[in-house]
Image: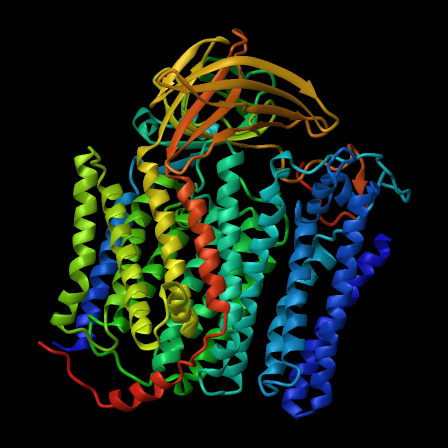
């Protein structure tokens, strides 16, 4: 057999295997769908079995710790959703009242969101609000915060 | 002062434009004075960028709270070292540091090559200055670091005290992690600039490689160091005990590392046999583009990540810059293909050459898979209209087999002969390492370990270690016989003769140690409990007790810590004090985990918080087997890389001419 053909065969096998592993890896356990709270409210029951990723703000004063379990209310454009978390990973330090949170998990039959993972960032991570209500002169880059 | 800083940046920007124009015109019209003038402009750019950086650092250290950047990233109570590191704590400042590092590299290149490589240099200068101009443009017009606060009118306001650096960044590795990573990111511009220069001037394919191979090794070392510092920081600060989470920005730093690792390997092929010339150009260019892409990913907010800076308007500019430069590079490579012909064919699937080829293939496959996974939300939204993200399990599923295949090749490479291996020498070389691997796996299974990947990984670690040790052993024995040296001097002599080969083996050894550490992750144990002070709970072989809770305050933060005692079989083992802090200025809570590090396993305790009603502490305890091997592996890797940088005692040029002569005639493969 020609060397080039042999190389081609080996390369095809390697790339094919990896492609297969990668493609078949995108499934229920690893992929999650970005949705907004209002989209979830409109979803039918069958679609709710998927893993979802929902972003929003943590309502002030809603965080309750009870042993392992932490519950809070996520708000996005005035729509609210109850979230429950009892995972093993500690919550990030940035997880607190008013922070932005991204919760990853599934909807339970009673409508509570059971989060398997929570990431949070303060209104703008790494970039705290500069000096209260003052504006930056000639501010070209107006920050979201 | 802020006006001087802003002016310096603006002037530097103008000078880069001049430098580009002068280099190109000088090279085109053959006017040496223009080329020299362009190089002097590089020196001026460096001085101006240094001045701007110095002014910003001065403002941060002295607390000039009229500046928006200072007010947002520094405060009075912060220790000096963090005031300094606030230089790269935010978008504007870190881009200024990018510029500073780039300007410094450009300065070094210009000074080093003032009398060498006259034909290439104008293009090297141009490449570096185009990049410099782009990054200066960002801080001159889009995200300027020298802005003052005002009430909306003309008056400048001094807010008195700032917000402080993000507390998560107030940790020692965070002082060195960003600069190191940037040194690695920015550094690949030098090999890239020389590669482009030699392409444009149609230099014979190799000169840029000889000029830049040290740069490549040094910047690779910076990248590795930066990535591992980040991993170390995540492990000891973030509190979940992981060192790698396949976060988009971590991935972004990993991608150029993969391509540069591939480059460092395949460059050997070009040096020794004149093969893979186009490939090497593609690799060095991809590395550079992935570095810019990584910077783009971190700063544009295109993917959500824990590392991401605030949303900013600079994203589209990056896309434009990347598109233009990639297009130019592709055009250049295509138009110069004639100069890049391989001098020798690949002769056999089982040979040293092909092991390099497969190493490259696998590294690139991994790079592509990670890139694809990172951009999956963007891709799926574009194609299916639904934003879907894949997370750590997916990345592990794809990359664990890739990593193991790579580990296997690490061991196989040195065992294969150049050009072609005969079945006989395969049998001779592979027998004992394979036996070692089988014995390791059998031994571990006897201890009741059944995790497939962990077994395979540890088995392969034995295999690779065996091949590396036997390489040193064979070489050392030969030198001992010939020169009559005793053992240790013989090892040193051997390494000194071919520093890159044996240094490379030591780097491989470091990687093996890291793999041992990664394998440990298969046996992690953890528990989360809410306990009364004085109560005990078990984890693995430990009994853990919270014996006290203490509180206190200093000018930077309020703290609360738990005194946690761990015992093994009733005997005291360690006392750990995980802490929770709330930083005064930012009101940001931070947990400081406590880790008892050992070679076999780490005991890792996080103080998660106090129950809202019960007022009892919640403790998260973990056991992480073998993690220390990762950090130990880094030191070995560092040592090996430094050896690679020592000039070899014997020049390895002869091998090349010899082989080229023989292999111009195509020998059909056996079978």
Quadrant housing residue B409: bottom left
Q: Is residue B405 left or right of residue B256?
A: left
Q: Is residue B655 above or below residue B533?
A: below
Is the C terminus of chain B in the top left, top right, bottom left or bottom right quadrant? bottom left
Return the x and y of residue B634 as percentages of the image width and height: 45, 51
Residue B409 visible in the shown view: no
Residue at (55% x, 59% y) in the render: B185
Q: How is the image coloured?
A: rainbow
Return the x and y of residue B260 as percentages of the image width and height: 44, 64
Q: Residue furthest right?
A: B155
Q: Is residue B277 left or right of residue A122?
A: left
Residue at (55% x, 18% y) in the render: B562
Q: Residue furthest bottom?
A: B30
Q: Nearer the viewer, residue B383 or A55?
A: A55
Residue at (49% x, 87% y) in the render: B203
Q: Is residue B504 above or below residue B390?
A: below
Return the x and y of residue B194 as percentages of the image width and height: 54, 77
Q: Nearer the viewer, residue A52 or B223?
A: B223
Q: How many marks?
A: 0
Q: Is residue B228 above or below residue B317?
A: above
Q: Residue furthest left?
A: B671
Residue A18 visible in the shown view: yes
Return the x and y of residue B591 as percentages of the image width and height: 56, 27
Q: Is residue B340 above or below residue B434?
A: below
Quadrant housing residue B159: top right
Q: Is residue B652 left or right of residue B578?
A: left
């Amino acid at each position: 057999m020609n060397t080039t053909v042999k190389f081609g065969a080996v390369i095809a096998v390697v790339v094919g295997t990896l492609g297969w592993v990668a493609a078949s890896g995108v499934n229920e356990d690893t992929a999650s769908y970005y949705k907004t709270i209002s989209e979830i409210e409109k979803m039918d029951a069958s679609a709710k079995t998927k893993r979802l990723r929902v972003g929003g703000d943590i309502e002030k004063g809603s965080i309750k710790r009870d042993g392992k379990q932490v519950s809070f209310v996520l708000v996005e454009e005035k729509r609210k959703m109850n979230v429950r978390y009892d995972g093993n990973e500690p919550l990030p330090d940035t997880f607190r009242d008013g922070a932005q949170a991204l919760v990853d998990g599934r909807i339970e039959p009673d409508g509570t969101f059971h989060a398997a993972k929570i990431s949070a960032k303060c209104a703008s991570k790494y970039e705290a609000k500069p000096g209260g209500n003052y504006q930056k002169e000639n501010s070209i880059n107006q920050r979201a915060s | 002062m802020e006006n001087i800083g802003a002016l310096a940046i603006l002037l530097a920007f103008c000078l880069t434009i001049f430098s580009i124009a002068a280099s190109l015109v000088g090279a085109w019209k053959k006017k040496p004075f223009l080329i020299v003038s362009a190089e002097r402009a590089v020196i001026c750019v460096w001085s101006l960028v240094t001045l701007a950086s110095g002014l910003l650092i001065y403002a941060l250290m002295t607390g000039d709270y009229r500046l928006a950047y200072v007010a947002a990233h520094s405060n009075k109570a912060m220790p000096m070292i963090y005031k300094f590191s606030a230089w790269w704590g935010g978008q504007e400042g870190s881009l200024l540091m990018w510029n500073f590092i780039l300007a410094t590299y450009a300065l070094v290149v210009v000074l080093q090559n003032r009398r060498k490589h006259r034909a290439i240099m104008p293009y090297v200068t141009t490449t570096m200055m185009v990049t410099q101009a782009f990054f200066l443009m960002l801080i001159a017009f889009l995200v300027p670091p020298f802005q003052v606060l005002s009430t909306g009118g003309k008056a400048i306001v001094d807010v008195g005290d700032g917000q402080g650096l993000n507390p998560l960044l107030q940790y020692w590795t965070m002082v060195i992690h960003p600069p190191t990573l940037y040194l690695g990111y920015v550094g690949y511009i030098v090999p890239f600039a020389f590669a482009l220069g030699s392409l444009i001037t149609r230099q014979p394919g190799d000169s840029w490689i000889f000029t830049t191979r040290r740069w490549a090794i040094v910047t690779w070392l910076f990248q590795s160091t930066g990535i591992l510092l980040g991993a170390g920081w995540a492990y000891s600060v973030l509190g979940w005990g992981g060192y790698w989470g396949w976060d988009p920005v971590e991935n972004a730093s990993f991608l150029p590392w993969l391509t540069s690792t591939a480059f460092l390997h395949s460059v050997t092929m070009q040096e020794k046999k004149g093969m893979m010339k186009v490939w090497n150009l593609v690799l060095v260019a991809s590395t550079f583009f992935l570095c810019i892409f990584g910077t783009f990913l971190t700063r544009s907010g295109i993917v959500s990540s824990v590392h991401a800076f605030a949303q900013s308007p600079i994203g589209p500019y990056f896309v434009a810059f990347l598109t233009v430069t990639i297009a130019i590079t592709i055009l250049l490579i295509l138009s110069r293909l004639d100069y890049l012909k391989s001098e020798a064919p690949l002769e056999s699937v089982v040979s040293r050459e092909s092991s390099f080829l497969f190493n490259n293939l696998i590294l690139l496959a991994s790079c592509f898979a990670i890139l694809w996974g990172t951009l999956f939300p963007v891709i799926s939204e574009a194609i299916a209209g639904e934003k879907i993200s894949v997370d750590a399990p997916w990345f592990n599923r794809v990359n664990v087999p890739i990593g193991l295949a790579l580990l296997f090749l690490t061991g196989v490479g040195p065992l294969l002969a150049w050009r072609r291996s005969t079945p006989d020498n395969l049998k001779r070389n592979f027998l004992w390492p394979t036996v070692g691997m089988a014995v390791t796996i059998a031994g571990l299974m006897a201890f009741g370990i059944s995790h497939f990947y962990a077994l395979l990984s540890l088995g392969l670690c034995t295999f690779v270690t065996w091949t590396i040790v036997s390489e040193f052993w064979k070489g050392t024995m030969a030198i001992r016989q010939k020169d009559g040296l005793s053992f240790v001097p013989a090892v040193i002599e051997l390494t000194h003769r071919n520093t890159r080969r044996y240094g490379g083996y030591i780097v491989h050894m470091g990687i093996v140690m890291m793999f041992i550490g990664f394998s440990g992750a298969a046996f992690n144990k953890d528990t989360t409990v809410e306990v009364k002070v004085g109560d005990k709970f078990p984890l693995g072989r430990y009994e853990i007790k919270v014996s006290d809770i203490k509180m206190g305050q200093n000018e930077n933060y309020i703290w609360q810590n738990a005194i946690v005692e761990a015992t093994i079989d009733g005997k005291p083992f360690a006392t750990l004090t995980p802490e929770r802090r709330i930083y005064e200025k930012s009101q940001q809570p931070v947990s400081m985990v406590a880790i008892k590090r050992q070679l076999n396993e780490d005991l890792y305790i996080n103080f998660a918080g106090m129950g809202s009603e019960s007022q009892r502490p919640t403790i998260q305890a973990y056991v992480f087997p073998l993690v220390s091997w990762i950090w130990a592996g880094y030191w070995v890797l560092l040592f090996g890389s430094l050896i690679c940088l020592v000039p070899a005692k014997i020049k390895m040029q002869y091998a090349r001419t010899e082989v080229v002569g023989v292999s111009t005639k195509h020998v059909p493969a056996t079978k």
